[in-house]
Amino acid sequence: MEKRTLFMAILSVVLIGVLLSLAYYKNQQAKFQQVLLWLTVDQSCDLQKSDCTLKWLEGEVTLSITPRPIPLVKPIQIVVQLKSRSASEPETNKIQGVTVDFKGTTMNMGPNNVKLTKSAPNVWTGSGMLPVCIRNQMEWQADVYLQTEQGIIIAPFIFLTRKQY
């Protein structure tokens, strides 16, 4: 009976250790995905004509999508540039990853995430593709996710595409 009791005690300790590790991991993951700031869309900027920039207290994010006009079902190049507005500790140095999520504003087009890679200081680049839509004109929202240690900053950009025949 003593061996069985010892086995159960060891098993309990291991199980508690696994559960505590899982709880710690989930807590860190939730903290990593917490939205810190959701910027406001600038309706006056047109990504079909130029790069667009959104600003917040510590910095700014500029999104560029080429070629223009932004095509459907053809490769697009995505560039995100970050600029700090703080001299003491630049916010842009805290960015650990950048992802762009394209979604239709009036129609669910399914997941379309593009993970960008750092190509230069404060510059993240990647390529993606927008799916074809049955409509002649489609409004899209490109959410730029800036991942920091504390959580995520989301910069939304709106643009229109038109079918090209």
Image (tube, grey):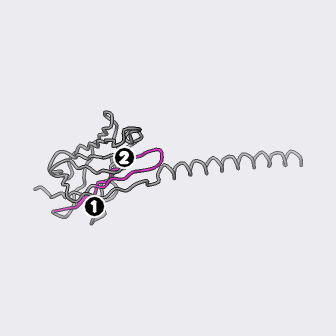
Amino acid found under the numbered disc labelled 2: Glu
- Residue at image mark 1: 104
Q: Nearer the viewer, residue 152 or 29?
A: 152
Circle 2 SS class:
loop
Q: Say which mark, if any, is on residue 58.
A: 2
> Which residue does the image show at 41% across and 38% down from the upper left?
89
Circle 1 SS class:
strand
> Which residue does the image show at 69% across and 46% down from the upper left?
17
Other residues around mark 1 within 10 Å, as few (<14) / some (14–19) / many (≥20)? many
CA gap between label 2 and label 1 equals 29 Å
Residue that protrudes farthest toward the top in the picture: 120
Amino acid found under the numbered disc labelled 1: Gly
Q: Is residue 104 above or below residue 151?
A: below
Q: Position of residue 6 (x, y in %)?
A: 83, 45
Residue that protrudes farthest toward the front in the picture: 88
In this picture, residue 137 sits left or right of residue 38 = left
Q: Nearer the viewer, residue 132 or 31?
A: 31
Query: Which range is magenta?
Result: 137-156
Other residues around mark 2 within 10 Å, as few (<14) / some (14–19) / many (≥20)? some
Total tally of numbered discs in the picture: 2
Verify whether residue 94 appears in magenta: no
Q: Position of residue 30 (x, y in %)?
A: 51, 53
In this picture, residue 20 sits left or right of residue 94 = right
Locate the C terminus and report the quarter of the image it occupies. bottom left
Q: Nearer the viewer, residue 46 or 1?
A: 46
**Labels 2 and 1 touching (C-beta < 8 A):** no
> Which residue does the image show at 34% across and 36% down from the upper left?
118
Does label 2 or label 1 sit earlier along the sequence?
2
